[in-house]
Amino acid sequence: MAIEIRKLTPDLAEEYVNFFDVTPHDDNVEEHKCYCVCWCNDDYISKDLSTAEKRRELAFQYVKGNNLQGYLAYSDGKVVGWCNANTKSDCLKCASWQRFMSYVPLEESDTDIKVKSVFCFMIASEKKRQGIATLLLERVCQDAEQDGFHFVEAYPYKESSYQSSDFGGYFELYNKLGFQVVLETEQGLVMRKKLS
């Protein structure tokens, strides 16, 4: 199976939203259409995220404006996977960060440390367990290093946490690619990979 990983660019906005139109969010929340608009570099205040249609429209605008960043995986010209990866410091006002991420430490404002955050994966049901998330994460790390980031950070949930969804990825995925646990809380883990 040949998989091509493409960085999300404004010209892929239609393919991006179409993927969310037809793909279940994850194994535990099939009916929810998030369009990943809650993990972005825009302030969520005054944004209406109440319906799938509104989230879809906002997602299209976000992709066009580079507010929503990440990578799409393609198989035979069709989108089969998504990884949301954005600059951590740019996402602190997004809806999900404000709701769920109070346990994650922030870098001191007077440092030059650049962190790329991995917030979400979504893989087409028929393509799960075939290594697509690994390929996406490898590309995130490769590009982050080329772009001068110091770390890639991820936030997998623990099975015992309040979050039943699998969208954040799993400890094993990050561990095999060299991520280390830097913080463990009731909500989940903070894992980091140092880039050279």
Image (spheres, rainbow, N blue to C red):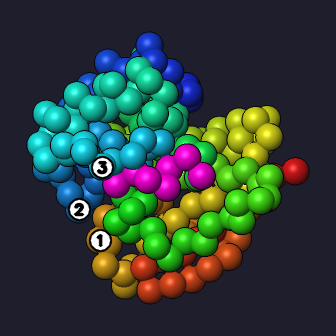
Dividing the picture into quadrants, the one containing residue 18 is top left
Mark whose residue sits in front, 2 or 3: 3
Q: Looking at the image, which is closer to me, 96 or 33? A: 96
At which x and y percent is residue 1?
Answer: 51, 30
- Amino acid found under the numbered disc labelled 3: Ile
At which x and y percent is residue 96?
Answer: 36, 58
Mark nearer the N terminus (2 vs 1): 2
* 161 displayed left or right of 169: left
* 89 displayed left or right of 114: left
Q: Which residue is mark 2?
A: 28
Q: Which residue is mark 1?
A: 164
| Whether residue 119 is visible | no
Q: Which residues are magenta?
A: 89-95
At which x and y percent is residue 190?
Answer: 58, 71
Helix, strand or loop at mark 2: loop
Q: Which residue is mark 3?
A: 45
177 vs 76: above or below: below
52 vs 195: above or below: above
